[in-house]
Image (tube, rainbow, N blue to C red):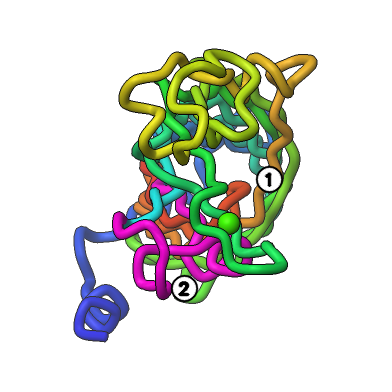
């Protein structure tokens, strides 16, 4: 609140009215920016399908956290309050290796889980958003605030893989290796049972859905800084900064 009231009352550097009415040969702005985002699937979603270390009798190590970090470049064509935003970005998984024990067993079974090990799992994405901007402080000031909301679709291509081990009782590769042991034992000594990205995707294409709500700091019509949150396609928070021309 202190920051907000400072921004709202601060005169900052004097607004140059000529910027507002600057003659341009086109009727739209181009806004460019760099973005950073941290995406994460909340544990509570996964609790619906998988045991975690704090469940009775379960494998005692914390289940891996599904998440990643993302950096990208964005370019928006802005006209009045609406804009089309194009982006390209690189996201890498921060998920560690670990044990995934489903809780859908008729009788609780903690030995039937799979051990998953991400190997340099990352992806490139590109997409398009339609965004709408709502000013919340007077735009005549050199610094003014707005809310931006929007959404869009994109597609990505995954790199790397997720190597997995299954319980010895259902193993189809290296079946002589600990045939009665669970995956969390076999992963230390046995050959992997396969890889998820390589085996289950005809093409390693991943769809992208984005829904974003942002608080945007506009520095006249020259530069901007945004605090973003929403779905991308997992829940995320992040920021972006860039300029207009
Ligand atoms: Ca289970």
Q: Residues within 10 Å of mark 1 (few under 14, many from 20)?
A: many
Q: Residue at x 48, y 32 (%)?
A: 32
Pointer 1 or 2: first along the chain: 1
Q: Quadrant of the N terminus?
A: bottom left
Is 162 included in the stretch rendered in magenta?
Answer: no
Picture disc at residue 29: none
Q: Nearer the viewer, residue 118 or 182?
A: 182
Q: Is residue 134 depicted above or below 232 in this figure?
A: below
Residue 104: x, y in percent? Answer: 68, 63
Element class at badge 2 = loop
The Cα atoms of the two marked residues, 1 and 2, are separated by: 20 Å
Q: For the magenta stretch, what is the residue range?
A: 38-61
* Front position in the image: 203 or 13: 203
Secondary element at image label 1: strand
In this figure, which residue is indicated by the disc labeled 2? Answer: 138
Q: Quadrant of residue 50?
A: bottom right
The circle drawn on residue 83 is 1
**Helix, strand or loop: magenta stretch:** loop
Q: Would residue 169 be found to the left or right of residue 70 on screen?
A: right
Mark 2 crowd level (few <14, some 14–19, many ≥20, 10 Å Cα):
few
Quadrant where ligand 1 appears: bottom right
Location of residue 124 in the rendering, given as x and y in whole percent from the top left corner: 55, 21
**Is residue 126 toward the left or the right of residue 5 in the image?**
right
């Amino acid at each position: 609140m202190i920051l907000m009231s400072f921004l709202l009352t601060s005169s900052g550097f004097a607004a140059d009215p000529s910027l507002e009415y600057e003659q341009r040969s086109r009727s739209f702005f181009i806004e460019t920016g760099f973005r950073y985002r941290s995406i994460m699937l909340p544990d509570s979603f996964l609790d619906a399908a998988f045991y975690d270390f704090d469940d009775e009798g379960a494998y005692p190590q914390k289940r891996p956290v599904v998440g990643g970090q993302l950096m990208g470049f964005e370019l928006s064509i802005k006209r009045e309050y609406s804009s089309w935003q194009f982006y390209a970005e690189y996201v890498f998984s921060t998920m560690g290796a670990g044990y995934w024990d489903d809780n859908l067993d008729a009788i609780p079974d903690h030995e039937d889980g799979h051990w998953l090990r991400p190997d340099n799992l990352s992806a490139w994405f590109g997409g398009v958003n339609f965004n709408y901007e709502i000013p919340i402080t007077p735009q005549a000031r050199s610094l003014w605030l707005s809310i931006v909301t929007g959404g869009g679709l994109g597609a990505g291509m995954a790199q790397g893989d997720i190597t997995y081990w299954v319980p010895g009782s259902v193993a189809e590769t290296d079946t002589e290796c600990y045939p009665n042991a669970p995956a969390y034992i076999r992963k230390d000594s046995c050959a992997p049972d396969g890889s998820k990205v390589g085996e289950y995707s005809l093409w390693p294409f991943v769809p992208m859905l984005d829904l974003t709500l942002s608080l945007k700091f506009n520095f006249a019509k020259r530069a901007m800084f945004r605090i973003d949150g929403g779905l991308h396609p997992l829940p995320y928070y992040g920021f972006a900064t860039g300029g207009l021309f």
